[in-house]
Image (tube, rainbow, N blue to C red):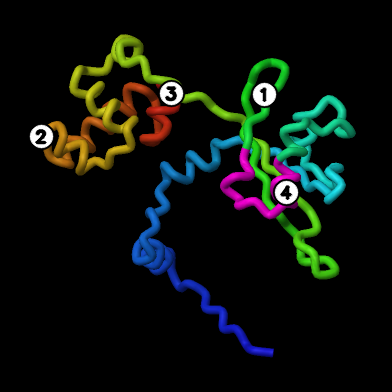
Amino acid sequence: MPQVAVRQQSSSAQTEAARLSAGMAPVTKDFLDLVRSRAYPGVLIMGLDNRIVYSNQEGLGFFVDPENVPAEVIGLCDKVKAGHEPQSCCGLLRQQDGVPYSLRAFPIGGPENGHGSTHVMVLIEKVIEKHDINYKRAKSEFGLSDREIEVVALLAHGLANKEIGSKLFVSEHTVKDHIKNIMRKMSASSRSEIIAILK
């Protein structure tokens, strides 16, 4: 049996450098805040007979009767079992209240008697509609200046401080000062919280 060497990263700086050299985006506090704020997806493990073998609590919450799996879920499971590409095994499920949920299905488990996967995993996530920021309300409610509103708008589009400075023809330091003032006025502790408060 070949030996596999496992090397521990000695510092977070090395980990970040490896991410950057691999072309991956740096893990920022804003990104981690966004990930933490997401709801847990519903997880269903379906047998090859399209019956639920396992579900987390969130997954069961989507069904009135777990014995009656929605046709959309069964259709995706059938696609997975037929060998369709993973990107085509996606769908949309609308509950009776009209709320949309995204569905993604993946084959899991090892080959059984020379046949493909043994189960299908279905992830169910609530689709959050994008909410536009009401800048006029933000200006009056939090007492933001016209320049601070411009900074907030660029923050909302995901621009970094340097990019904001370039767009507004000010230094990166000035942008940081604007962001500090915005955070103070809004009682926000991060850039992502500024946007979350305004949505």
| Residue 174: image location, x then y, percent | 16, 36
Q: CA distance from mark 3 to mark 2?
A: 27 Å
For residue 79: magenta?
yes
Instruction: Please say if the residues under marks 4 and 3 sit with CB atoms less than 8 Å apart.
Output: no
In front: label 3 or label 1: 1
Disc 1 designates what residue? 94
Which numbered disc flags the more N-terminal residue, 4 or 3? 4
Instruction: Please say if the residues under marks 4 and 1 sit with CB atoms less than 8 Å apart.
Output: no
Disc 4 designates what residue? 121
Instruction: Please say if the residues under marks 3 and 1 sit with CB atoms less than 8 Å apart.
Output: no
Q: CA distance from mark 2 to mark 4?
A: 50 Å
Q: CA distance from mark 1 to mark 2?
A: 46 Å
Disc 3 designates what residue? 197
In front: label 4 or label 3: 4
In front: label 2 or label 4: 4
Dot 4 amino acid type: Met
Dot 1 amino acid type: Arg
Q: Is residue 1 above or below residue 108?
A: below
Dot 3 amino acid type: Ile
Location of the N terminus (image quadrant): bottom right
Which numbered disc flags the more N-terminal residue, 4 or 1? 1
Q: Secondary structure at mark 1?
A: strand
Instruction: Please say if the residues under marks 3 and 2 sit with CB atoms less than 8 Å apart.
Output: no
Mark 4, other Cα within 10 Å: few <14 / some 14–19 / many ≥20: many
For residue 134: magenta?
no
